[in-house]
Amino acid sequence: MEDWLNTLNNWLAANPGWINAAIAGTAMLESLAIAGLAVPGVAMLFVIAAVAGTHELSAWAAMAWACVGAIAGDSASFWIGRYFKDRLPSLWPFSRYPSALERGVGFFQLHGGKSVVLGRFIGPIRPIIPMVAGAFGMDGRRFGLFNVVSALGWAPLYILPGYLVGASLARDPDLPPHFYPILVLALVAVSCLLALFFRLHLGLLPQGRLYNATEKYLRRHPRAFALWSALARPRGKTREFPLPSIVLAVSALALFAFWTLIVIKTSWLDNFNIATMEFFQAARFPLLDPLFIAITLSGDALLLGAGFALFAGGLFWAGHRAAAVHVVLAGVATTLLTTGLKYGLFLARPETVDLPPVTPAYPSGHSSGVTVLYGLAAAFIAQEFPRRQRWKIYGVAALPIFLVALSRLYLGVHWFSDTVGGLLLGLAVCGMVRVSFSRYDRHPLSLKRLPGVALLIWLLLIFGYSTFRWQEAIARYAPLAG
């Protein structure tokens, strides 16, 4: 296999005009039923993407061709399943290895239509799920929606690592000292914080120790327990008190107030802010700049406003009017709080890029906005999942929040303290909105089509907005000379 991959690498290096076609073909084979079980698609895509990066071809074109190939492969698999149906167990290799098909069937029966999206990212069953969906008679239009949405997320994940490795080898960037140890340490720290958050979240849910202890204590105090009953979610026979949301709101608000006092009244964070800024400025790499500019554009105020409107509109259309009102109020509150604090405190930004007109820095509006938007979306969706599976939803939502905050540091438009302040403010707003909404949360949110359609529209909005603002953003975030 190693020799074969080396041969592929050498051939593409000598024939770069075939790179995009190779990406599309490999993505299609990797997603195609039966063929995808035998083809080492992940390794091949990494090698081809690395060659594309070495030759400084367009990363956007590489991801687009990967997306097209993945959609084509899954579509072909779906119609293979639709055609063969009950005869699938008799086809090779399922006739010899029936466990592969059985795993795909079990996964599809457990997750339904969502398995088309989830299965795209799970290696052993990735080429099986679309075929099983076709065999089980899934609606073609619904499958097509899930197919496109999952491919849009899958392509960057499988193309960018190889592309960036190839580009780095070609450019030989001058990284700051201890770059990789610091990167690993930061990732470990973020992972530990998320794990701690999820562990505390479980304890604050019904049947959790903290939840039961709190309820037992309040039952001995009639007035306090009346508040418990008033805020409890009126679903079914048991009423769930929003203890996790209250703890999140109170703790995030207290931490934000404490953090803000440190920022404006002391110089404790000054040296760390400067060190962080200098580290990221030394790490700036021309081929990485477009990636982080695209990420930071996804957190622009105008686009986030469209995101809140889409979120609220979808909920209102589905009949969840109280939820829609709360989402609108969350967007308005985040805008007013962030803008008021920015201009009330008027703390200066780092002088690393030219940002006319000069705007104050603290707290980061990108960080607070994406935290509220993705945090609330995750909270609404996670409520419809079993309690011990909700961490997966919150984990997925944490990724874009983290990336947008990181992009602000990488591009040098915010201090570290600004991004942390924005995150804490966003978490406080999320918690308060969820507490307020709890007493109106009477009916389950439908997860059949609404999230998939909304996600597709949201991705198209991000793409359209980024394309429209691209040239301006390239100039806006260019590092200042000297």
Image (cartoon, helix red, strand yellow):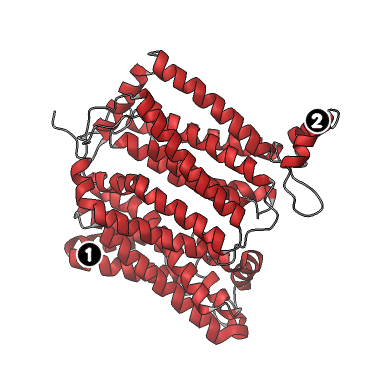
Q: Quadrant of the C terminus?
A: top left
Q: Which mark is residue 11?
A: 1
Pointer 1 with pointer 2, Cβ within 8 A: no
Choose between 276 and 129: the one closer to the eye: 276
Q: Is residue 69 above or below residue 296?
A: below
User: Helix or strand or loop: what does disc 1 sit on?
Assistant: helix
Q: Position of residue 298 (x, y in %)?
A: 36, 49
Q: Is residue 204 left or right of residue 173?
A: right
- Disc with the residue nearer the chain's start (1 vs 2): 1
The picture quadrant where one finds residue 68 is: bottom left
C-alpha gap between disc 1 and disc 2? 76 Å
Please tell me which residue is depicted at 33% across the width and 52% down the height of the picture: 160
Choose between 192 and 464: the one closer to the eye: 464
Q: Residue furthest right?
A: 220
Q: Residues within 10 Å of mark 2 (few under 14, many from 20)?
A: few
Q: Position of residue 326 (x, y in %)?
A: 56, 48
One can see residue 184 in this view: no
Q: Residues within 10 Å of mark 1 (few under 14, many from 20)?
A: few
Please tell me which residue is depicted at 18% across the width and 44% down the height of the picture: 475
Q: Which mark is residue 223?
A: 2
Q: Position of residue 293 (x, y in %)?
A: 28, 45
Choose between 210 and 34: the one closer to the eye: 210
Amino acid under label 1? Trp
Amino acid under label 2? Arg
Please tell me which residue is depicted at 37% across the width and 13% down the height of the picture: 267
The picture quadrant where one finds residue 20 is: bottom left
Q: Is residue 259 left or right of residue 389?
A: left
